[in-house]
Amino acid sequence: MSDRKLQLIPLGGLGEFGMNSMALRYGDDIVVIDAGMMFPDSELLGVDIVTPDFGYLEQHREMVRALLLTHGHEDHIGGVPFLLSQIDVPVYGTAFTLALVERRLEEHDLLSTAKLNRVKPGEKITLGPFTVEFIHVTHSIVSAVALAITTPLGVIIHTGDFKVDPTPTDNELFDLHTLAEYGKRGVLLLMSDSTNVDRPGYTESERAVRPRFEDIFNRAERRLVISCFSSSIHRLQLILDLAAEYGRKVGFLGRSMLSVTEIAHGLGLLHIPDSILLRPQDLMQANPAKVVAVVSGTQGEPMSSLSRVAVDNHKHLSVEPGDTVVLSSRIIPGNEKAIYRMMNHLARRGADIVYGSTKPPVHVSGHASEEELKLMLNLVRPRYFVPVHGEYRQLAKHASLASHLHRQGLEQTFVLESGDTLEVDIHGARRGAKVPVGRVCIDSGTIDEVVEDIVIRDRRHLSEDGFVLPIIAISKQSGKSEALPEIVSRGFMTFDERSELLQEARRVVAKTLESSSEEERTDWGVMQEKIRADLKRFLIKQTSRRPLIMPVILEV
Amino acid sequence: MSDRKLQLIPLGGLGEFGMNSMALRYGDDIVVIDAGMMFPDSELLGVDIVTPDFGYLEQHREMVRALLLTHGHEDHIGGVPFLLSQIDVPVYGTAFTLALVERRLEEHDLLSTAKLNRVKPGEKITLGPFTVEFIHVTHSIVSAVALAITTPLGVIIHTGDFKVDPTPTDNELFDLHTLAEYGKRGVLLLMSDSTNVDRPGYTESERAVRPRFEDIFNRAERRLVISCFSSSIHRLQLILDLAAEYGRKVGFLGRSMLSVTEIAHGLGLLHIPDSILLRPQDLMQANPAKVVAVVSGTQGEPMSSLSRVAVDNHKHLSVEPGDTVVLSSRIIPGNEKAIYRMMNHLARRGADIVYGSTKPPVHVSGHASEEELKLMLNLVRPRYFVPVHGEYRQLAKHASLASHLHRQGLEQTFVLESGDTLEVDIHGARRGAKVPVGRVCIDSGTIDEVVEDIVIRDRRHLSEDGFVLPIIAISKQSGKSEALPEIVSRGFMTFDERSELLQEARRVVAKTLESSSEEERTDWGVMQEKIRADLKRFLIKQTSRRPLIMPVILEV
């Protein structure tokens, strides 16, 4: 048994932000930790969702024993439907996490075939050579767990996403004891969340937002509109509790807000005070001083409820002068401009906007800061350390943090990016062969519409300098082009129909045709290349621009 | 005289970030305060620079007495060449500000004709009915001024950009006394910088970065690479001073870094210790423990020196393991991803990266926070208040701040956006008629290449769903299309040459042609519209996508 090796195969989320997925293989058995998605960079034009390429798992489908989920955020579960559509594998997670997965599976018609297995923190399951214990951790979402995976070569700890909240609002404390126990007995390898490694000190407790919210409820003289992530059950509980205290009714707006609160309520994770809820359609009828609207769309997503409210285009809610709008969330990098635009619209409606780094805070992070990361390293005392969940700069900083602890016992830290593997055997750990990983771009949330790389490259190209199409009509009879070629273009600045440049470009194409040999002219592929090259050279020289040039040859 | 009115005409920078420009008109005399530019939103695909539309000034060219510059940042002077290419107007500013303007004018071959007039803080000039006093303020750039403009109707104060730095590194204190004097005598209207209105408290002094920099110089065992804005003369002075103390030589990299330091040195604003400079080409030869490279490119601009260093593609500098890279600047919203990408590359080279909100800070803002803004309002005691420099949410917050001061004497606050005007006469102030303003998009820094709106719209369209071009060859003889139409597409996902959808689309176009009357078929415009409409309907139904459809009809 001990001559076999253990492999860590990061499929996503290492060296990139989002779409976390990690495979763990021992011999012919694989378990997968999380299957997340990410929202694309703006460079991936027109792409809606990105997931890891699960090709490695597809290739080894008969080995995959289970998908283990740490918690219900999209960057950990958003890829589940896409993975399950490729391989049939049982899924393990806490009740709330699985309930969120069910929503997604339903959208993709995969719910009836999925094998979902609820687990509780403290529970252990055995999957081939692996024994997995689920350990309760605190995070911005409820029911988050870390994993302790006992393998024939030792124990692997994966923290999932966490912070060490000393005063969680639901009083469910981080299970430090179980981690300490594993640490005491000896841990082979730790994988730990690197998201907030840049932040010194400790992340504030979720409870730290209460004073700010109390102040907001105290001061607000009219309607209160609060936006947060719909999965922030702690935050929603706080809003419900304060609404009850301050005699306001609560209306939830937005599809995800409605469905997630229903799920959390059904599982007993969200306590909704009696007759406090208001139907969305009744929001505007109620006394403004007596309502709170809780609205999804903190990131300025154009179709979200809050964005529509901001431009006064929501069926059930208008913001009026004197209303207070609270953005209780962080700005995900890349969304700044959209969020500021939304805030400008809300300010134009006369709203007082509360957001950002106020003191006391209106939002706290769910991820561990530097001191908590050190605590985790000191508690678990791993022999090897692999930072996970972050861009390279964050992983590197987390690695350097671990090495500066100067702890005895930590033999080595590995900064792996998705596709880099790590091998562990009785002699120790080392980097293994790379596996092909990548991103799958999905156009509109359906599984079929995968956008190929070339389409994205073309779109980017088009978006920068537009396109120029020389169209050459060649006579079937003579094999020659009898008129000056046409040129069609869009998005390319200096071309209009009357321009001198366009006329000259037509002559450039005609000249390329004339100067080609008879043989070349019968080979369309060659002619297209020659025309493209000549016209490109001409346009770069004249305009310094590089539009997409695509010669079209028509036989007429 | 007193029956005339005073007008405030914001041409840019109110309700938007950047390209600040404000015209002040009394009767037939106009002075313009600043002529900035902005870098475009990513939606303005392929646009390099955006300036205000100076059409209002062009129309009233004979009235424009002067362009007054508050300081040398691009969002205040970047539009000067574009304005001067349209109207010939004398420019007033401090020596350093004008030196930076000269650089820009030179690039556009406008330097020889420009009328540049150096002024000093404390100086007064008279321009028609206006008397302008330049008042020294503290900001992240040296030689910044506020303006006190005495008009027949009263005094207008424009703060420019400022913070109230109690301990500026050059010991040139904010001239609070002159402002207080004006405040005491009575000010008609104040325009004040709103950039940091969201920040509570006071902005830290420029001197606050010194402890962090000392710590960095103390700890660095190898090469130090520091990036900051090239116009941050205070910051550059600090680096030079510490380099001298710690026995390191300094190499400046980057075109703007070299030219700005030369200008500042020439004006006596930057003291360069003896024989401390290293030529760029000597950087890698020197002992790594004995050099500092000061590099431009804090915003991750792809062609900047630091971006090239990050991917190890710079002629004169390589970052090696153990080197320290310091990003001493803020992240301008929208640049996050580019900056993080650059940092990932630097981390891959093994650099230790110092950035962000460390304590003590590695960067401090140049703009006043809430308490300083209150100080300005209390000192100037204006009758009317117009917040400037900010998006709507910031202007609105600044206005609300002013109204919450409950000062006697402040009659009214106006939140104006670019194009909104304000009129003041002996009876008071009120909103005036709008003037047409707008943005001029410039493609590559030259004055000629103005990108039209339609080009930008097309580019955006293309970037989202690509294009589809049905090409119909019509015989000159028969007036008919004799073969099935061709369809060419790019960036449109589901079309490849063999696809069923493409074949069907060709048949859709053919059917449109067949079902058209003889008369329609002779009118190309009508045929193009019909084909576009039919094909669009077909593609939306089949794919839910809206590529740019552009029918091409060729007579052959």
Image: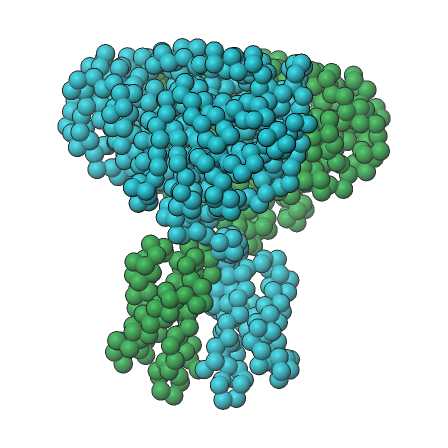
Chain colours: A green, B cyan
Q: Quadrant of residue A97?
A: top right
Q: Is residue A80 left or right of residue B290?
A: right
Q: Nearer the viewer, residue B425 or A27?
A: B425
Q: Nearer the viewer, residue B273 or A446?
A: B273
Q: Quadrant of residue B508?
A: bottom right
Q: Is residue B183 above or below residue A279?
A: above
Q: Residue at x 27, y 32 (%)?
A: B259
Q: Residue at x 74, y 16 (%)?
A: A218
Q: Residue at x 26, y 31 (%)?
A: B258
Q: Is residue A414 visible?
A: no
How many callouts does the rendering have?
0
Q: Where is residue B522 shown, x and y percent of the image?
A: 57, 81
Q: Where is residue A171 shown, x and y percent of the image?
A: 66, 15
| Rendered-image quadrant of the N terminus of chain B | top right
Q: Residue at x 37, y 70 (%)?
A: A503
Q: Is residue A474 above or below residue A550?
A: below
Q: Where is residue B400 shown, x and y percent of the image?
A: 65, 22
Q: Quadrant of residue A288?
A: top right
Q: Is residue A528 left or right of residue A85?
A: left
| Rendered-image quadrant of the C terminus of chain B | bottom left
Q: Where is residue A529 shown, x and y percent of the image?
A: 32, 67
Q: Nearer the viewer, residue A279 or A465?
A: A465
Q: Nearer the viewer, residue A400 or B548?
A: B548
Q: Is residue A465 visible?
A: yes
